[in-house]
Image (spheres, helix red, strand yellow):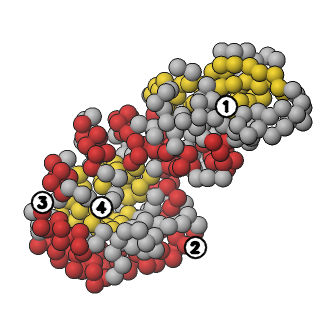
Amino acid sequence: MNTKVTINLKTINSNIAKVKKIIGQEVKICAVVKANAYSLGAREVARGITDSVDYFAVASLDEAKALRDCGIRTPILLLYVCSNYKLAKKLNCQVTITSLIEAMQLAKSGCVLDVHVKINTGMNRFGIKTLVELSQTIDILKTSNCNIVGFYTHLAKEEKQPIKQQLKVFQVFANYIKELYPSALIHTAASGGLKEKTAHFDMVRIGKAMYGGMEGFKTAIKIKSKIIAVQRTLTSEGIGYNGEPQKTSKLIGVLGVGYADCFHRNNSNKGVILINKKPSVVCGNVCMDCFMGEIDSSVKVGDWAVLMDNKKGIRLMDISRRSSTIACELLCALNFKRCKVVYKQ
């Protein structure tokens, strides 16, 4: 294989330790490993960090089953609407209830589960918006003997003032909840809310921070690919699909990885990679199976280029800024099926 990917579990654990320093020892950590741990491999990542976290969060019961099948016994929270309460029970998966209707469906199923109730404070995807609906939902869950173990919301923005506005809404619910369930876990902050201490409550849910998709955290992935061909372009020739005429002749290295793999098309004509420790700029549009970068005469076929690593210029957040997209999208777009993947402890 032309491309090798190294997932550094030690770096992920280091990022978790940094979160712990921010939130303190009393606040629990829920590691978000949905979407195959943002493409990094949910089973391997979960096994590698299970001693560092208190919960795992997933988006589907299939994801929960994958964790249980590989031996994970840590509590798992299903973040989205549950489609099969019996399976959730079998997997010992805690579910999220986001409406009175869902509470009624759970009661009808006859399954007794551990439940987190979600409050809508402004994200407007899922959640209960009024104290009246919350009270009715709690009553239904009580009559079905379900254990209400948590209440939470999801912050829509990462800036301080919008966070404070949502927390002000949530606090009304939190006060009501704490009177009824003083031991229930209250959680609001994902990675973007870490900087706001008042959002920490009893637990934080972290995804992108673990993997390096946030400023101040280390990139946990190294991607490198081989130079598979070298071309010399002439002045006025284009490079790649719909290539614009070049003002000068260039020596081009062709790398055997493209947007079908783990090199986003947003890198076209502006991405930066390291070849023999020297920066190289992507030339032309990234292709499905390969892309081109400018090189000097010292570079030969078979040399390795580093596309992503915890190094200035090719960190996940550097790539995110150049690509004008969020780190989460870049991570979730990574496809390693044609790459050799290794996990570093």
| Gap in angstroms between the C-alphas marked 3 and 1 | 53 Å
Q: Earlier in the sequence, mark 2 or mark 4?
A: 4
Compare marks 4 and 1 and give the one earlier in the sequence.
Answer: 4
Query: Which element is circle 3 on?
Result: loop
Residue 139 location (% of width, % of height): 17, 77
- Residue 341 is left or right of residue 158, and the answer is left
Q: Residue 297: which quarter of the image? A: top right
Relative to residue 12, is residue 305 depicted above or below?
above
Asked if the residues shown at circle 2 and circle 3 are in contact, with their CB atoms under 8 angstroms apart, the answer is no
The secondary element bearing badge 2 is classed as helix
Badge 2 or badge 3: first in the primary sequence: 3
According to the picture, the residue beneath numbered tag 1 turns out to be: 291
Q: Nearer the viewer, mark 4 or mark 3?
A: 4
Residue on which the image places disc 3: 111
**Residue at the image point whose x is 20% and y is 59% from the top:** 114
The nearer-to-camera label among 3 and 1 is: 1
Residue type at mark 2 is: Gln
Seen from the viewer's position, the closer of residues 264 and 197 is: 264
Q: Label 4, on which residue?
A: 81
Please name whichever residue, 61 or 284, is drawn nearer the observer in this view of the structure. 284
Label 2: few (<14), some (14–19) or many (≥20) C-alpha neighbours in 10 Å: few
